[in-house]
Amino acid sequence: MAIRLLTRLWSSIRNTAQNPKVLIQQLPYRGLQVSTVWTQPHKANERVAQFANFLCALHLFADHVATISSVQGPSMIPTMANEGEIALELKWINVHKLARGDLITYASPLDPSRPVCKRVLGLPGDVVCVDPTGTYAPSTEHVVVPKNHLWVSGDNLAYSRDSRVYGPIPMGLVRGKLYARVWPLRDATVFPSNFDFID
Amino acid sequence: MQALRLVRLPWTRLRHSSRDFLAKRPTIHWLLSALVWLPLGLFVTDCIANVKSIRGRSMQPTLNPDDSQWRDVVLFNRFAVRILHKYNRGDIVALKSPVDSKLIVKRIIALEGDVVRTLPPYPDAEVRIPPGHAWVEGDEPFRTEDSNRFGPIPLGLVESKLSYIIWPLSRMGPLGQPVIARPDARRGSPDWRKSQADLEREKWRNSRVTLAPESSSLSS
């Protein structure tokens, strides 16, 4: 399928580029019928190319601007259900302007092809208690989050693999930020920050 | 019907005026119709391959050797990394530095499960690479900031894999094949000495890595 699409694309480019001068002579210049090589005849082929172009634009938008993504797994349970919820994810973010309490998505350090969602707990320079429950580390152990790293944690500590397991994550891994829940409709909200200072 | 026509009127007028405007200025028209295909181009540079020039000396002598007048211009393969997620020992990759998120070019020395003997700035003498991580180093041990400073890196930081040197012409060609002693070069000639040095460096690099046994890499 993909190969057929590619050959179709290639032939469309080749056909139209064969002899641009002749084409221009045949079709006198008028209005929107352009003299450019790539907007010339062979309509069917051109449609395919345009469709591919459109798909590329969609992909780029979803990769760099915003997308809707379904969230699965028990690690964020009070915030997101185990399955069946869809969230609006912003990809056009400034990683250095993330705040404590933001929900972020990042490529898992354990498996680069797996995007995961967790909550930011510590920014660079913060002192974080590694594990208050004492399962992964003694509950008295504290670390300083290094420069350009984030300390992340799931909301459901019992079922979450997060910074307690693999330590602070580099900001380069961050892919986006969950902004709002859009499905199911009756629970649709903009995620509030649950971060609070305690005196 | 009349109302519809009234609504459409400004649009038609705008369309006609823009058509006239463009008909008088073919260059602008050409540029605009080229702009329509921008997403296709961006997609290729984002997901398939892109061309970049290399700055700095950390990958000498593989890239930017001292006897070269120019910065190397190379082709990075993004498809193999971003979509196929294939990583091999010995690949030269571009990754976001964990220290400041800038793009750096380094060589993957070891993958998950391997044991590496580290070089001086690193606190431990030996490291076992955790799952999903890699050990990256520059080819020039004195002028590089690599895993010996910041430890094993998650593979998610890797963006693309260097696959072809485009410029300078004298070293143009694909990268990533194992180094072989050049049979055509005469013993003692500069070419021969260079390939011998390459071989020796690779041998030294490999001697510091104990590969993970196959069974453990399968199970993890």
Image (tube, coloured by chain):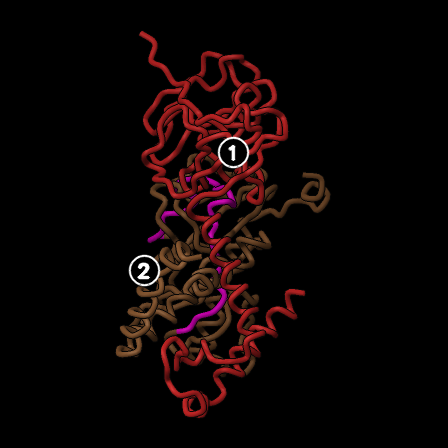
Chain colours: A red, B brown
Residue for badge 1: A87
Measuring 57% from the left and 27% from the top, which residue is drawn there?
A: A161
User: Can I make out residue A151 in this image?
Assistant: no
- Which quarter of the picture shows residue B115? top right
- Is label 1 in a helix, a strand or a loop? strand
**Nearer to the camera, A46 or A142:** A46
Q: Which residues are magenta?
A: B142-166
Q: Residue at x 71, y 39 (%)?
A: B219
The quadrant the C terminus of chain B occupies is top right
Q: Is residue B158 magenta?
A: yes
Image location of residue B107, percent across then percent down: 47, 55
Could you say where residue B149 lies in the image, as x and y percent from the top left? 39, 41
Q: Which percent across, then down, holds residue A193? A: 40, 22
**Quarter of the figure with the N terminus of chain B:** bottom left
Please tell me which residue lies in front, B163 or B78: B78
Q: Amino acid at mark 2?
A: Pro
Q: Which amino acid, mark 1?
A: Ala
Instruction: Tell me if residue B95 comes above or below residue B191 in the rendering.
Output: above
Percent of width and height locating residue B3: 39, 54
Residue A70 is a magenta residue: no
Q: Which residue is mark 2?
A: B10
Q: Is residue A114 left or right of residue B196?
A: right
Q: Foreground mark, 2 or 1?
A: 2
